[in-house]
Image (tube, rainbow, N blue to C red):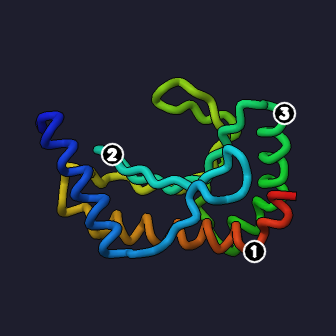
């Protein structure tokens, strides 16, 4: 069991190490689409790379989601075959969003032995998400 401070330090060390190992300028929130962002997540159970639709206006979120669904086969066939589409994903804070994601189970941010595999997973999958976005952003942000 880790103290809050030890856990915080491990998280910080992981993300600093990830940034040094893969010094990439990620798109993340800079998509030019309101409440449409790419995210990294790594905790004690799994790592996730996601595209989150977090629009407070449900109609706009649905409209964006439908655009993404129209590209689902392309995303899965050409970029991320293991992508999971979830139109009603509940975050830890109970907020509902729409999310497309890939996950890697079995690693833990508290286990440094799983860090390298997780960093490679995060990097490779975010590169694929961003390549997809770059290619189809005209459809997504029109």
User: Judging from the image, what secondary structure is the residue with disc 2 in?
Assistant: loop
Mark 2 and mark 3 lie on one chain; the one further toward the N terminus is 2
User: Judging from the image, what secondary structure is the residue with disc 3 in?
Assistant: helix
- From this viewpoint, is residue 86 visible? no
- Could you say which disc has been placed on residue 119 in the image? none
Q: Quadrant of the C terminus?
A: bottom right
- Specify few, some or many for label 2: CA neighbours under 10 Å numbering under 14, 14-19, or 20 or more: few
- Specify few, some or many for label 3: CA neighbours under 10 Å numbering under 14, 14-19, or 20 or more: few
- Could you say which disc has been placed on residue 59 in the image? 3
Nearer mark to the viewer, of 2 and 3: 3
For this view, does 69 lie left or right of residue 126? right
Mark 1 and mark 2 lie on one chain; the one further toward the N terminus is 2
Q: Quadrant of the N terminus?
A: top left
Name which quarter of the figure residue 14 lies in.
bottom left
Residue position for label 1: 135
* Distance between mark 1 and mark 3 Cα atoms: 25 Å
For this view, does 1 lie left or right of residue 128? left
* Residue drawn at x 75%, y 74% as measured from the top left: 135
Residue 45 image point, x, y percent = 33, 45
* Residue drawn at x 80%, y 53% as measured from the top left: 69
Residue positioned most to the top:
94
Residue 12 image point, x, y percent = 25, 52
Residue position for label 2: 43
Residue 55 image point, x, y percent = 71, 37
* Distance between mark 2 and mark 3 Cα atoms: 32 Å
* Residue drawn at x 28%, y 44% as measured from the top left: 44
Mark 1 and mark 3 lie on one chain; the one further toward the N terminus is 3
- Specify few, some or many for label 1: CA neighbours under 10 Å numbering under 14, 14-19, or 20 or more: few
Seen in the picture, residue 132 relative to 11 is either above or below; the reply is: below
For this view, does 91 lie left or right of residue 140? left
Q: Badges 2 and 3: C-beta atoms under 8 Å apart?
A: no
- From this viewpoint, is residue 42 visible? yes
């Amino acid at each position: 069991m880790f103290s809050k401070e030890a856990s915080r330090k491990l998280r910080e060390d992981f993300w600093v190490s990830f940034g040094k190992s893969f010094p990439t300028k990620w798109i993340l929130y800079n998509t030019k689409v309101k409440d449409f962002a790419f995210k990294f997540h790594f905790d004690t159970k799994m790592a996730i790379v996601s595209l989150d639709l977090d629009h407070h206006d449900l109609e706009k979120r649905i409209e964006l989601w439908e655009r993404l669904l129209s590209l689902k086969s392309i995303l899965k066939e050409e970029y991320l075959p293991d992508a999971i589409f979830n139109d009603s994903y509940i975050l830890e804070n109970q907020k509902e969003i729409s999310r497309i994601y890939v996950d890697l189970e079995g690693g833990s941010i508290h286990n440094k032995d799983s860090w390298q595999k997780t960093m490679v997973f995060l990097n490779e999958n975010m590169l694929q998400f961003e390549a997809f976005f770059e290619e189809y952003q005209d459809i997504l942000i029109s």
